Amino acid sequence: MRDLAATCDFYARALGMEVVTFGEGRTALRFGDQKINVHVAGHEPATIAARPTPGSGDFCLISREPLARWIEHLKAAGVAVEQGPGRRTGARGPIDSIYLRDPDGNLVEIANEVEAPAEPISPLRDWLRALQAAVRARDFAAGRALCVPEMIAFGTRAEFVEGLARIEAEQWRHVWPAIRDFTMRADEARGGIDGDRGWIAARWDSLGVRPDGSTFSRPGRCTILFERRDGRWLATHTHFSLVPGG
């Protein structure tokens, strides 16, 4: 910086930072658990940036205070907002931010982090995880609770089965006890929701068990249709099949 007093006054008055002294009379600007070490051009300490130049800084400060309050405060402090507010990309995700400059011309960004919207198919991903838990526990009652009674299913073992009772008897009770580590790749699933209907396509992994107790990889894929009834997403059709050649 060119003027220590002007810089400290700006950051304390305009941005609410605390001016602190440390070491052998060095100065820093503290905010929360962070601080910025400052020094006057031509009087730098021994350890500094490779090419310190007043006005070359560009950094972002995350704040919980709404930007509207910041804009009002900065206006009262006589500090101009150069750009914003606007939506941008921060280090941890989307942000809304404004830009201003300090006495040396360094670019200072003040930002509010924006919570990323939940994915529309999050409830369907949760359904996959619930099914995974039911299969692993061989909990057929929990599996039935995820489906409509009139569900239709295609599968590797049962080619076409209608009605939840038959699906459990002809598909689930033959497969679930014979596999281990059933894992839905819920985070990779793709699908969509339109009103009270939805669909999802996903891959899954499992281990098959041979008569001698040894296991082998048994991967597969599925497509599931859903209907929302009384606020709950229930499967109306499932198609589970092994990966070709798997």
Image: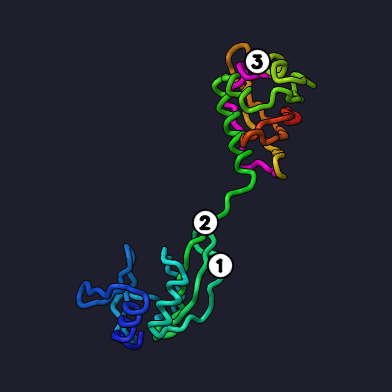
Q: Is residue 141 above or below residue 78?
A: above
Magenta-span inclusion, residue 174: yes
In the image: residue 42, left or right of residue 139: left
First along the sequence among labels 2 and 3: 2
Q: Is residue 54 visible?
A: no
In this view, which residue lies farthest toward the front?
Answer: 230
First along the sequence among labels 1 and 3: 1
> Element under label 3?
helix
* Residue kind at label 2, given as amino acid type: Glu
Quadrant housing residue 35: bottom left
Q: Is residue 128 visible?
A: yes
Magenta-span inclusion, residue 221: no
Is the C terminus in the top left, top right, bottom left or bottom right quadrant?
A: top right
Classify mark 1: residues with Cα within 10 Å, few (<14), some (14-19) or many (20+).
some
Question: Which one is in front, 216 or 148?
Answer: 148
Q: Give me the residue at 71% from left, 44% from top.
A: 195
In the image: residue 188, left or right of residue 170: left
Q: Which residues are magenta?
A: 172-193
> Element under label 1?
strand
Mark number displayed over residue 88: 1
In this view, which residue lies farthest toward the left?
Answer: 24
Mark number displayed over residue 115: 2
Q: Position of residue 157 (x, y in %)?
A: 74, 19
Q: Position of residue 24 (x, y in %)?
A: 20, 76
Q: Position of residue 97 (x, y in %)?
A: 50, 70
Q: Give me the residue at 40% from left, 77% from top.
A: 73
Mark number displayed over residue 173: 3
Q: CA distance from mark 1 to mark 3?
A: 52 Å
